[in-house]
Structures are given as C-alpha cells and as structure tokens.
Amino acid sequence: MSVRASDTGPARVGRAAWCPRRRWELSDRQVGVLFLLPFAVVALVFVIYPALDAIRLAFHSKLPFRNAFTFVGLDNFRYVLSDPVFWAASRQAVLWTVASIVLQTVLGVALALLLNEAVRGINVFRGLLLFPYMVPTVVIALIWRWMFNPELGIVNAGLRRSGLVAGDIYWLSDPTWAMVSTILLNVWKFTPFVVICVLARLQSIPQEIDEAAQVDGAGAWPRFLHVTLPQLKAVLAVVVVFRTIWTFNKFEEIYLLTRGGPGTSTFNLAVYAFEQATANLKLGVAAATGVIMLAFLFASSALYLRLMRREEA
Amino acid sequence: MKMTQRRGVTRRQFLKSAVAGATGAAIAAPAVLRAQGKTGTVRVWGEPGPYGGVAVDGMNEWAQKNAPGLKFAIETIPWSDVYPKLMTDLAAGRPAHCISVESPIAFQLMAEGLLEPVDDLVDRIGRNRLIPGIKWDYWGAWKGKQYVIPAHHQSHLLVVRTDLLKEAGVTKSPAEWNWNDQLAAAKAVKAKTKQFGFCIALGRTIATDYYVISMLHSAGGRMFDAGNKSEVVFDSPAAVETFEYIAELFPTMPPGAVGYTFLDVVDSMAKGQSGIVFYWGRVFGRAAEVDQQVFANMEAYQHAAHPKTGKRYNWNDFQGWLIPKDNNPYVNEVKQALIHIQTSKDWQIRYAQSLVPNVSPVFQDVATDPRLTQHPFFQTKRRTIFEYYTEALKNASNSGNELLQGISPLAGIAHGRAIIAQGIQRVIIDRQPPKDAVKWTHQQLEQVRREHIRLVL
Amino acid sequence: MALRRSTRRRLRATAVYAALLVITLVTCFPLIWAGLTSIRPNEEMLKTELLPGRVTAAHYRALLAGRSMYFEAGGGAYRASTAPSQHFLAWFANSIAVSVATTVLSVAVSTLAAYSLTRFRFPGQSVVPYFSLLGYMTPSIIYVFPLFLLIVRLGLADQLPSLILGYLSITLPFCMWLMWAFLKSVPIEVEEAGLIDGATRLQVFRLIVLPLAVPGIVATSIFSFIVAWNDYLIARIFINTVTRLPLTVGVMHFFEGVHVDWGLMMAASVLMTLPLAILFMFVQRQLVVGFGAGAVKG
C-alpha cells in the first residue's frame, strides 16, 4: 500500500475544516499539534536540552561539592587528550568492539541459518536463543562473576577437571583474561540481536533460489557463499555499523563486570567518563569525553544512514 | 502553521495544569513543614556495620523524649560509594543530616566549609574525657574550630593465623617481626601450606590507599607536608621502598587481590584463604561467624617494624560524627542527640560492643568501665582486643593527619580518586618500575594540590 | 552413495536438532547455573558438582522475608536496615512501578506523535524520525549527568518519577521511530473513508488506527519495559535512598559493602529475570516481527 503523509483539507469533502460540529471537537490542525506536543516537550526538555547541556559542560569546570561552574575553554579537552588513560581506554575500546563485532556477526549468521531451518518446534529454540538479549546486564554480570570466580566458579572447575588447564585462570584479575571475559559477556548478550535481524532477512529470501542451486548440485558451503551471503550483505552492513556504534560506547557490560579493572585495563570511553565524573568529581572532563564520543557517534551514524538508504533503494 | 482560536479547555490541558500544580505543592511542602519545626526523618550516614545502627537507636531514644515528631534513620554507604553519594546529594541540595566517616574525608569536607562547627559540644561531652594521649584535633579541627565529634577509633593491625605460621615453620613471634621477617613468613606460608601467605587490598579503591600509606609512614615517608601548605613530598626513597616491598609481597598474595577491597580481605582471612592479613577488628567478628577453627587461631599484633626506622605505624580511622551545615534543617536536633549518646556510658558501651574489637572506645571512663569487657570475645581474645583498643593508639597515623603531625585536607581528595591505589597498580599490574610509578603518583598528587590550592593557603 | 531424499531430510533434521540443543544449552547455561546455585545450601557452595546434593529455599525465603545480615542478626536486637535482602521486595515494587509507568507513557506519547507525523504535514517532519534514531543511538553516559542536574533543578532528585523521565529520554526516540515506521505502513484509505462518513479525527484515531497499530504497540511496549527494567546507570545517579532503588542498582548492593553471599545473589538474579521471562514467553513472535522490521528497514 502506498504511504504518504496526507494534508488535512481534501479528505473532508463538504465541511469546512475550521468549523466544528460539536463544541469540543478539534480541527485536524489542533489534533496534529496536540498529538505531537507531549513528544515535543519531552524530547526538547529531556533529550535535546541535556545533550546540548552536555556540550556546554564540556567547556566548564565544576567545583566538587558546590554548584558553581566556571568557563575554562578547551582545558577539559586538553586534559583528556593528554591523559594516557584516555588513549589506553580508546585502544581498549577499539579492541573490545572489533573482537565483539566479529564474533557476534559470525555466530549470529551461523545461528540465524540454523534457526531458519523448517524443523518442528523451531519456535521454541528461537525463543530460547533470543532470551539473552533481554536479560538485565546486572544479572548476567553477577552470574558471570559467579561462574568465572577463580576458586569457586564452575568455569575453572570444569577446566581443572577436564585437565585443560593446570592452575586457576584469574578471569577478572588479569588484564588479558578480563578483556576476554567482557568480550564473552558482550557476545553472549548481543548475538541474539544479530540473529533477529539476519533471520528476518533470511525469511524474506524466496526459497526457490536456494532450491534451484541445490538442484544444480551445488554443495552447502558454496551455496551459502554465492547465494545466501550476497542477499545478506546489505543487512549485515547495517547491523555491523549499528552494533559497532552501540558496542563502542557500552557502559554497563564492562563496568558491572570489572569496573574497568584490573587497574584500568578494561576501560572504554564510557567507563572513563563515568570515573571522571564520580571518582574524580570532574563533571567538565566527563562532558568533554562525552563530546568526543558524540563526534564518533555522528561520524558513524552518517555512515549508517548512507548504508541504510542504499539498502532501501 | 496557523492556529485557530478555541474556547474551553481540553482534557489534556487540564491534566497538565493539575500535574503542574501538584508538583509545585509537593516541592513546596517540605519548606512549609520545616517552618513548623519538628517532624520528619533525620538521615544519618554510616559505613557498613552495625554500630551506625546502634548510635541511631540511641539518637532515637533522645528523639522520643525531646522531639517526638522526628525519627533518625541510618543509611549505610558502601565505601566505594561515599564520594559519588556526597557529590550527588550535595548537588541536589539534600545532604545527609549527620555523617559518620573516617577522618581524611572529614578533613576535606571541613576545609571546604561544608560542616557545622561543634565547639559548643566539646565541653558538653567532656573536653578532658579522651583516653590520655589522643586529642580532639585528631578527629577534625580546622583553623581553630572543632568540626567533628569523636565516635570511635579503629586501627588496622597485623593479623595472623598462628596455626599456619606453625605449619610453615615460622618460629619468631609476630610481636618481634620487622619487614624482612614479615616477608619471609609470608613466603613460608605460601610455600609450605595450602594457603596464600599474605593479603591486603590492591583494587583501585580507597582501601588500597590506606594500606600503602600506613606502610609508607613506617618507612618514613609522607604524601603532604601539612606544616608547609601541604606541599607534596611523596617522591622519596621511602615511597620507592614501600612500592618495592609490596611488589615483593605480591607473589605470596591471592592473584585476585588486584581487585580486592575491604571486605574481600576480611573474607580472605575469615574463610581461610590467607595466613597473614592487615585488618581492622571486624575480621575477628566475621571469622567467629564463618569458621570457628579459623577464629580460634587468629591473633593480632602491632605491625612489623621497619628495619631502619623501627616504626610500626597503623592506619587509624579516627571515625567521627560530622554535621553538614547547608540545607540541613536538623542541625540543632542532631547536636542534642549526639550529646545524648556521647555522654551516656550505656550507649557508648553498647556502641563499642556492637563490633568487637573494631569499634574502639575513645573516652577514658568508657575504656575503663568493667562492662566493656563483658563481651564473649574477651574470653579468648583479650590480648588481641587490647592491641586494638589501646596499644594501637601508640602507633596511630592516617593520611589526613600524617604521623599525627598536622592535618591536610588534600588526602581525602587523593583517596576519592584512589591515586595511591593507581600508583601501586602500575607496579603490580602494569609491571612498571617502582621509581616511575612513584613519580607518576607524585605528579597526580601535585595536580590535586594545584586544583585545590585554595584549601591549603 | 546417494541417500534417499527422505533419509537425507531426516538426517539433516537430526543434525539440526543436535546442533540446536547443544547451542541452546550452552547459551542458557548461565541462567540454568544461576537457578541451580540459588537452590543450593550455603555449605555446598564450595563444591562444584553440577547438581546440588540438597535443595533449599532458604535464599528465596531470605529475599522475600527480608533476612538481616550476619552481624545484625547475631549481635543483639539492632535492626539497622542495611541488609540488601531486607529491601528486595521494595526494590521489586519500585522496578515494576517505574517500568509499567514508563511503558504506558512511552507508548502513548510515541504513538500519538507518530500518528501526527505520518498524517499531517509539518515543517521539517522528515527529519524527526532520523533524529529520533540518532537519539536512540546516543549512549546515556553522555547526557546522564546534565540530565541529573536538570532533575535536581526540577526538585525531583531521589524521587522515583525522575527515573520515569530519565527512561523516557531513552525510550522515546526509538519508540517514535518504531511507531513511525509502523504507522507509515498502515493505509490511510480506511481513515479517509471514516472521515468522509462524518467521524472526527479523534474517533478515527481511536477506532480505526489504534486497533490496526496493535502489533507495533506491542513491540514498543516490550522495548520500553525492557529498557526501564534493565537500566542501571540512570538509577545509580538519580536515586540515593536505599529503599527507593530499583532492582538493578539494589541488587548490585549485594556486591558492595557486603560479604558476598552467592546463593542469595543468584536467587535475586533469578527473581529479577522472571518478569522478563514471562513477558518474553508471551510475545516472542511479535518481537521478531516488530524488531526486524523496524530496525533493519526504513
């Protein structure tokens, strides 16, 4: 069905638009404004204003414990850009994002292919495999801490018993393993998102193409590579960009598991900003970090929009 | 876009104004109540533990007779949350009405001018009542005024598992140890028993700061020179030696210690993970609860002496009560309630007995009261308890009042950022040379001083 | 050796089932393990057998009845209200109240706004949906502190309604986007017919459009509820009083300033996930349709 925003005049043949029949009846114009008003108010006051204020704060410094702001120009940015912890956090964020996205995409596509099979009871599996996406991060972080506890956790117990590892792996106390743990958590939680998007696309691919290739004698892997994958390219591009933007700026998945530790080895920019605000009580510096994150966000969403328009076309 | 005029009010508009009216009324209500006086909840902050609750019970006893509309309520704040909570509450204009906190944080708040002076309470409570040798200043006096009422004192001491030391073949009594003996004992326990040798907190938290500072003091170092406008004097051979010593101890510690904070160390001893820890008295209560065998074999001593200086400094919180002065409608009620519980020997003893031997009494008459020793722990741990109660005071120190030679308000700020913790973590986690880590820490402290120079000039 | 078609199909189905079972078990293992731990008595916590030797409801009882912490229970009659388990029910109630309110408001506001944007002409209206998407992608860490300062100025600091406002700032952009995409595909011919027949715009909206929009509304509700239920950062900054916390921040109290009690924590985790599991069971089909359509397509 064609979709168009309609103007208010022509549909109401025979009655002037401004003349009401009943006292409380509203014209289309008024309905339009009235319906939009709550959204406009909330969006302006609670979304746009704080975002703009965040940018303003980036150029100010707040005394701890007092409500006084002083303009400091670019000082906060200079502080951030000369802080080695910021650069380490950026590097770690890139590493964390790339590893998570690669794993999520590969696993997501594989799972989506599996879930696309027309076997009985597939809906049950679909449901179960999509649930991680909905689990609160707090819950999964706590369960992770319990499972990966070096002395009491089931993961080390399993590794010990199977003889794969001699001693205990200190999952959250060693910089490398802590990074691995946070990546694993991220992959566990968000692969379902990739699965949903890819599955939706897969289900809209007509089966005849694949069946034709099968009849032609093509094996499973070449079929995937040359028939299915090209169909998925557009969706994957969009999903990857989308997930990258999200993952790069994620706060809770890291903070609730490691608090950015051990030391600062799992810091990303969001954790860095949070620590500047709450531990160092430097709201201005946190806001400056936020502005840098926003810049990254704008650049990547421009890319996302361009890709999405191309997929629509 | 043109708007035509409409008479009357739509349902939506009416609702909006009703909500606005209700919100306005809700915001105005507390101010109205304040004007009338004595009703509401007086919020009291304390660190995790039962003693805050005991004190608040005492305050409520006062309130029942003198201000029946008021109720005192305790809120325990995890140590990691003190700074964020202070920031958000003060920013929101609703601080707690009374806070129990350790002295470095109290020093920062009083220097910032956020606290109510309490000189009028000093004589009411007893100017000369303190245990001989300790002064009201230790809790918080600034520019001639007293801002903090002593609640109790709590030191961290050397706590050992005597059975593990025996099993490891350590014969020298911990009472006679120096740093080398301590390291050797830790190594022996690690090598010859199933437990780790040593444990302190090394996470990026305030706990780590406290541990490192007390060792720094024994080694002869300090962070700031309180007598000279808090000039930063951290970078010194003593600091390097302290960092090196901890690095040498680390292999005997649980690897998870790099993320440990206070209660993790408690559990490390109480659940039998480590043979030697530094801890406040709380560890004994926890062990008694969790493992009677462990409890039976635990003993506390003054710290190992530094081989050169001979010093055995411990970290003493000098925990005190303070009263935020802005946006606080209950200043007078809090003062009266504090007088009530501080002058009542009954409440002081109940307070101390709520967590033996962590909560050490500060008033002489309380410390010598026979009822104080009626707690079951005194049957088996009498010597240990008095190490905490009285002996520890001879070696007391903390970062806000280094070597008890003068107060610097910058310490609290440094600890809020866990600067010392980050410094030692550079050695332990990032494997930087101790000299470089000390230099880095020194620079961070100088930055703190620069940003808050108005507090010390 | 060529297999018969039906055999090949059966083999393939078996392989698929096997793969699915293994993957599902691995994926669901954390939650299963949490459940098993939550019924394990404290004495067995050190053992790492898969199944507990003895089953106990003690942890759940502690949460639902509010057991005090060790040093408060034994040390005398001091009821210092510091034990996390004492507040669990309050936290649960807070989460429910705030999540439901956020959902209702998000759906209402975004549906109305989306209808307005797709049916009427405003200057700059084609930009609004894309800006909404941008808003959705902005991580809350960027604006949570200025938002907090605003909340303080409104006098709402440490009050539950401040959470609703905070969550709305997260949910509205995406809900707007979802409903806009959805309502765009609802044909206007039926509405126009109704209007010609003499119905008012409001009646058309209520009686014709809303019923057609139900799938989109369901997707939007699920999304809003999940955002509100799962949030940690905003609640952590906005709320201070321990009895006013929602579940997420409250349950993290099990980890701070308290000796870690794994059984209790896993029981809390299970109870915290339960409402979402129930919600999910009812609406999983809609989730795939609504999400897939909204997020991927335009």
Image (tube, coloured by chain):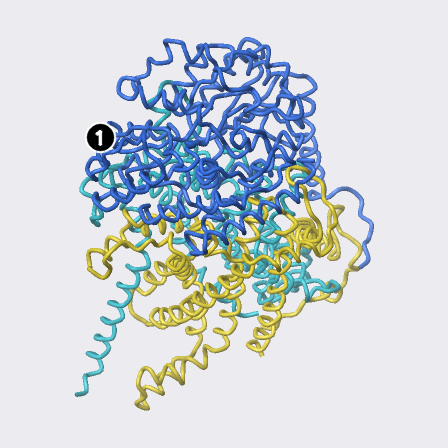
Q: Is residue B251 left or right of residue C149?
A: left
Looking at the rendering, which quadrant does residue B349 occupy?
top left
Label 1 Cα crowd, 10 Å radius (few <14 / some 14-19 / many 20+): some
Say above or below: B185 vs A118.
Answer: above
Q: Secondary structure at mark 1?
A: helix
Q: Quadrant of the C terminus of chain C?
A: bottom right
Horizontal and vertical percent position of residue A128: 34, 58
Specify the colour of chain A. yellow
Say above or below: B204 vs C156.
Answer: below
Horizontal and vertical percent position of residue C271: 37, 42
**Disc 1 target residue:** B293
State the residue in front, C212 or C116. C116
Q: Residue furthest bottom?
A: A216
Q: Quadrant of the N terminus of chain C?
A: bottom left
Seen at 65% across and 41% down, the residue is C151
Q: Is residue C223 left or right of residue B323?
A: left
Chain identifier of the residue bearing label 1 in the image: B
Horizontal and vertical percent position of residue A294: 62, 61
State the residue in front, C102 or B428. B428
Disc 1 marks a residue whose amino acid type is Gln
Horizontal and vertical percent position of residue C202: 66, 53
Report if residue C273 is visible in the image. no
Report if residue C283 is visible in the image. yes
Looking at the rendering, which quadrant does residue C92 occupy?
top left
State the residue in front, C248 or B169. B169
State the residue in front, C17 or A52. A52
The chain painted cyan is: C
Q: Residue furthest front?
A: B308
Say above or below: B21 vs A205.
Answer: above
Specify the colour of chain B. blue
